[in-house]
Image: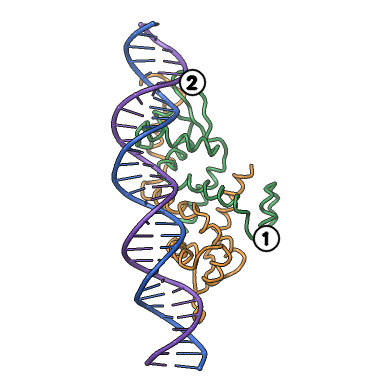
Chain colours: A green, B orange, C blue, D purple
Amino acid sequence: MSENDSCCAHEKLEREGMPGEEMLYDLADLFKIFADTTRIKILYALMEQDLCVAHIAETVGATQSAVSHQLRILKQARLVRFRRDGKNVIYALSDDHVHTILAQGMSHLCE
Amino acid sequence: MSENDSCCAHEKLEREGMPGEEMLYDLADLFKIFADTTRIKILYALMEQDLCVAHIAETVGATQSAVSHQLRILKQARLVRFRRDGKNVIYALSDDHVHTILAQGMSHLCE
DNA sequence: CTAACGTATGAACAGTTGTTCATACGTTAG
DNA sequence: CTAACGTATGAACAACTGTTCATACGTTAG
């Protein structure tokens, strides 16, 4: 299995066994984001199509405020991006790692 | 509300695309497990080789009690398995989803 | 301009989480 | 048997997290 990733930590991992402290904290922080049902719902919703905040709130069954707070977290983690459209703000997934990570989680659950 | 926005077909999402409530909670619970540095360290350590509790504690730099508590959580999620060896209890990874999920997380961090 | 709408944000709150400490359990040596 | 060792567990504690509420911000219609 030849993983030709540009990620420098992979080589280090194979040599030393464990990433550095800082990297481990970043990794834990990333998984924290997927550890909440509201955020997962938002991500699944955005996998279908780009959505404004009000429609996200409606789709996931949460208040506008709660969704806005969570979108802030997803933004900071660069998992979603956004653009203004008049009074609305449209959110979208920023890359396809979201899909891959969620799919792997599902795969474990269904084994 | 009757306007034709670029995000007006959100009603479809409630029918397809999104897993059920129960599955979403299980998925969030799974990612919660990866959302802690102590547990991540334990998993990385076990990727190298099977280890008893005392050696895990030494490797990850945590107390025996803290490690034992976390191993309980990893056990319940079926991410690790264990066997007795005299007075020791040897822990090991139970499947390779652990490696895949951690690698995907790393991949996102290094993009 | 002002009003209405969509969105963002801060504070307060309840619920959860991970660690420490003390102690109990299980196994083996003597 | 008892003592010593490795491991597990419960309670208490501090730190963190997600929601709600109130309110402020930014944009557009009139």
Residue under the point 37% across and 31% down: A64
**Quadrant of res B110:** top right
Image height check: is B9 above or below A79? Answer: above
Secondary structure at numbered mark 1: helix
**Quadrant of res A36:** top left
Q: Measure the alpha-carbon separation of dots 1 and 2.
A: 49 Å
CB contact under 8 Å: marks 1 and 2: no
Residue, disc 1: A16
Give the class, few, some or many, for how many residues have Cα within 10 Å of label 2's Cα (few <14, many ≥20).
few
Residue, disc 2: A85
Closer to us: A19 or B34:
A19
List x then y, in percent, for residue D5. 50, 80
Image height check: is A75 above or below A100? Answer: above
Residue under the point 42% across and 42% down: B18
Closer to us: B14 or A66:
A66
Image height check: is B94 above or below A53? Answer: below
**Quadrant of res C6:** top left
Q: What residue type is labelled 2?
A: Asp
Secondary structure at numbered mark 2: strand
Residue under the point 45% across and 67% down: B65
Q: Nearer the viewer, mark 1 or mark 2?
A: 1
List x then y, in percent, for residue C3. 32, 11
List x then y, in percent, for residue D30. 35, 6
Residue under the point 53% across and 71% down: B54
List x then y, in percent, for residue B35. 49, 52
> Which chain hosts label 1?
A
Q: Earlier in the sequence, mark 1 or mark 2?
A: 1
Count of numbered circles on the image: 2
Image height check: is A80 above or below A34? Answer: above
Q: What residue type is labelled 1?
A: Glu
